[in-house]
Amino acid sequence: MRLFFFLSTKERVNQVERTARHSPLRVALNRFISVFRKPHNAILLVLGIILTVSTIAPMIFIARDTFSVHPGSVDAHYTGLTEGYTLYNWKDLFTGRLARINLWTPLLNSMILATGSCIGAILFGGGFAYLVTRTDLKYKKYLSAVFIFPYIMPQWTLAVVWQHMFSSRLVTGTSDGLLAALFNVHMPLWWCKGMFPSILVLAMHYAPFAYILIGGIFRNMDANLEEAALILNTPKWKTFFRVTLPMVRPAILSTILLVFSSSVGSYPVPHYMNLVTLSTQYITMGERRIGQASILGVIMILIGVVIMLINQRTTGGRKQYTTVTGKSGQSSQVKLGRVGRRVIAWVCIILTFITGILPIVIFAIETFLPNPGDYSFLTTGNFNLLTLKWWTTAENITESGLYGQLGILYNREIWNAFKGSVIVATFCALFAGTIGTLVGYGVSKNRRSKWAAFVNNMAFLPYLMPSLAVGVAFFIFGSSMGIYNTYLLLILAGTVKYIPFASRSSLNSMMQLSSEIEEAALIQNIPWHKRFLKIIVPIQKSSIISGYLLPFMTSIRELTLFMLLCSQTKIITTMLDYFDEMGLYAFSSGINLMLIVFILLLNAAINKFTGASLDKGIGGG
Amino acid sequence: MRKLFAVLLALTMVLSLATTAFAGETLSVEEVIKQAEQMTNEELFKKAIEESKGKVLYGIGNSSRGKTAGASFIAMLQEMDPSYDGIIEWSQPKSNSIFTTLNADIKSAKHIYAMTLIQDGNQIQSKMLDTGNLLNFIPKEWREAEGVDVEANGHPLALQTLNKIFMFNNVGGDTFMNSWDFVKEGQSPLFMGVNSELVGKNFLYMLTHEKYANYVKDAFDALSEEDKAYFQPFVDEVAEDAVYLGLEAENAKYALAWIKLWCQQYNEETDDGPISNILVTRSAKGQTGLLVYSKLRSIEESPESSVNNITVAAYQDGYQGFGGYAYKHYLQVVKTSPLPWTACAFIAYMTTTQEGFSAWGKDIGGYSANPACNQDHSMDGYVDGENKFDAKNDRGYDWWLSADGGRLVVEDPAYCSQVSFDLGDWIDMIIGSR
């Protein structure tokens, strides 16, 4: 067979025509084989399909629910239908006589709450990040470790602590909290309940996001620009606003993105603080307006989508999460002065004590009180009033003041729920970590492909959707599939929701990886799985482990996402919320302590053995 | 060959007959209930053992104590048949999701839930009974038991009636002698949000019922002239609403005025637990609340907290008006129940035996619809023969419901579901405008 090059022109034309005649199928097949012989393409195709289905299917269920007729609900009552579909729910929610109460006020409150939380988190977390990374502040290591404590705790526990601190008979119409009982201090109502404390609690909870994201940039920032400004006699404030701040803009945008969507979907904090938001209204409307409640879920999902689109427009695709923008090796530290570095450090120590340590101390004390919130041992100075009954009561036949519960150490329901949470968190971490890592790998290898961008967005979308909206979608989906109250449903929801942790972490680290390393192995005919496991994984071990660690840590203390998907005793956070709602704070505080100790121990162990840790995960550490 | 053919034919016939006979024995859940209603407990328990050996019965309910009752039921069946190894898996979903969960289970291809212990008569009526998704089962021994009121508690079958009653903190010497006192200017009674625990909303619906609207009017008439003058404008203001809402009770406007003031003023808490924790403290001087009676059982005496810091409003001599409200826990069989015999047997066990009801019966404030299952709590406040905590001496179901006793407002599913749509929106508008 002669080579094409040696053929005559006529023969060449004939061959081309022949090829063209046979080609459509063969060419397509050849192209298909050629494309999918590359593992990253196959990975993207498979994961793209899985992620699209797992993200879109629940959304379709929730969207359909908004048009469905629900027997016993207003849609059935006012349309006279018993089944089928109707537009009634949409019309009534947007234009009905309860539109202001059911939609507009909760929507406005959610927006204010989310915006306020973003601002608070950025100011608190960003300011703290600046002090820790760019100044010669004292006690940095301690402060850095304690600062992430509020993120480890379930968010509403801070709200409960807030209530314990500031409630007062004169203002909130309850019994006196710690401040009122011990110091006769009565804070105003806006301080005790509603929007302000909700914003503050969420800002404290999400400030570690800002700290990690913004701190990552501060830590690696090239100081040349600031020094140039200094040489040009630029005032410090101008340097900060014109040089420093623009450099941390991507991290600020990332923080806004993450905190805004998380705050919009937060249920427990506004619930405990008596604030009406979209999330709390969703639960409220479940009785007679279930279809309209689903519309609130759709609105929350749309908020997530809009945030993503705005973010893509303002920062140009996936660059928005790149927190490391260049490493010149030069960084300068602002001198706070001999006194200043200590004074500011102590201010920070007090602040972090209030946000990170005090809640833990209060949790611990609460488990020894005779009645929930009964601090009479402080007012009387009689420590004999403290009790171990919440821990050690081993029977519930005689009433020991535990409302029919056994003490924490003997309470099988608590320990079973804890086991359930560990199971759910472990599988979520395994699935989300693996899928996320592969998504990161696949996308990094196809940086210009539209499909890769689509898969990347599809993987990240659930994170931008408020947790309650995702929970609602999976609740309707899971109920229809007959998997309500199963670990399967919880793991499915958790995996979809937390893939972004792993995919972001993985993508950022894979982007830094030169393709030459893998190509060298490819030349030596080393199969893909070996290249991946023996070369790529070891190099990016820290980021990849973070991609497993974060879904684990987050799902073990997650409530909003899971609360509609299972019974109250299935996992530890639903159990914790149950005890908090019931006012059995000793149990909820004990569970909180268990969670905090467990997460810290696990984090420390993983950090010791692998170098990865919680505070390196977000933003690709 | 012929022999082989004959044998095959015979086998086929036998199999067909067996299949037909087996199919003939597969009863629908309705048919099981019909038969079960004619059976004694013992017969029913045997059927349950036969049906659920080695299987799991999934129950779902608003009360976590269903789990304790389930364990007791299994132990009883094991006494009858030591080889019995069935299990009851009990789940308690959050808030209102029990209705969605049950409906989804009924619609799904694989049915899980066999029975439910459920509250909120309004939704049970409109979402579950009117649609036929839940089926009522009345045990024979319950129906025939002494003192059982089948008409009041059989449709749907009630496991128990629970009361939520007005209490107030007496440390500052305040007294509340009339149900209108709780909605006076400046009062902010502690209460679970009506949309977070919907039996509270049913209570408000029920107030507009003729019987209870009369209670409200009688209490109004017993007010001082000064108080009447204060409340009258509120009554006049809602008179038109009563007509617009189609309320038939003559005194509905008094009920609506009370409801409106209540909704504007109540201080929302997440549960009755925190309410009782607050009310019993010394610092909650003069505070009031409407909460479940049984919460008093677990207060530990300390310098700050004491049961004696509160007074049960209806226990005061001369108290006017209603003392609170009563709601019920209903027991129902799911229409797609995979284990209907066991579900019926479990229901019979809880409603006809003291052991079956003991998970609830051990506390004050919960009354079985079968008087034989109730325990006496009239002296729960006595310690070593001395009446130490008067508030804990439960005066019992009959006293609480009687017109010259506690005058509780009792939930009626049919009435609630009849008025809930318009009245529910009216209430939501008041709460949303607070």
Image: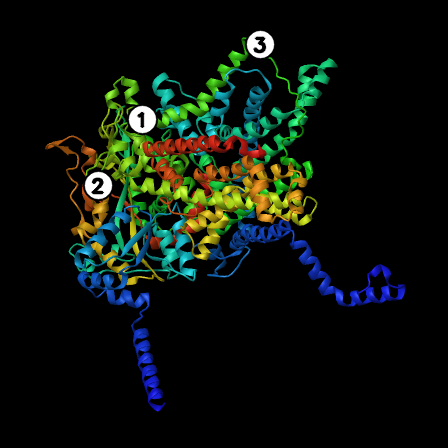
Discs 3 and 2 lie in a common subunit = no
Determine the CA span between mark 1 and mark 3: 50 Å
The residue where tag 2 is placed is B364
Q: Which of the 4 image quarters holds residue A299?
A: top right
Relative side of A299 to B126, left or right = right
* Chain of the residue under label 3: A
Discs 2 and 1 lie in a common subunit = yes
Q: Amino acid at mark 3?
A: Gly
- Tell me the number on the disc at residue A337: 3
**In what element is the residue under mark 3?**
loop
Where, quadrant-wise, is the N terminus of chain B in this rendering? bottom left
**In what element is the residue under mark 1?**
loop
Q: Position of residue B340 (x, y in %)?
A: 30, 62
Q: In this picture, is A172 found above or below B2?
A: above
For the view shown, which residue lies furthest in the left direction?
Answer: B385
Q: Position of residue A179 (x, y in %)?
A: 38, 20
Q: Nearer the viewer, residue B29 or A176?
A: B29
Query: Looking at the image, which residue is at 70% across and 22% down?
Result: A242
The answer to whether any part of residue B369 appears in the image is: no
Relative side of B388 to A275, left or right = left
The residue where tag 1 is placed is B284
Determine the CA span between mark 3 and mark 2: 66 Å
Discs 1 and 3 lie in a common subunit = no
Relative side of A202 to B39, left or right = right
Q: Amino acid at mark 2?
A: Ile
Q: Amino acid at mark 1?
A: Ala
Q: Nearer the viewer, residue A48 or B348?
A: A48
Mark 3, Cα crowd under 10 Å, few <14 / some 14-19 / many 20+, is: few
**In what element is the residue under mark 2?**
loop
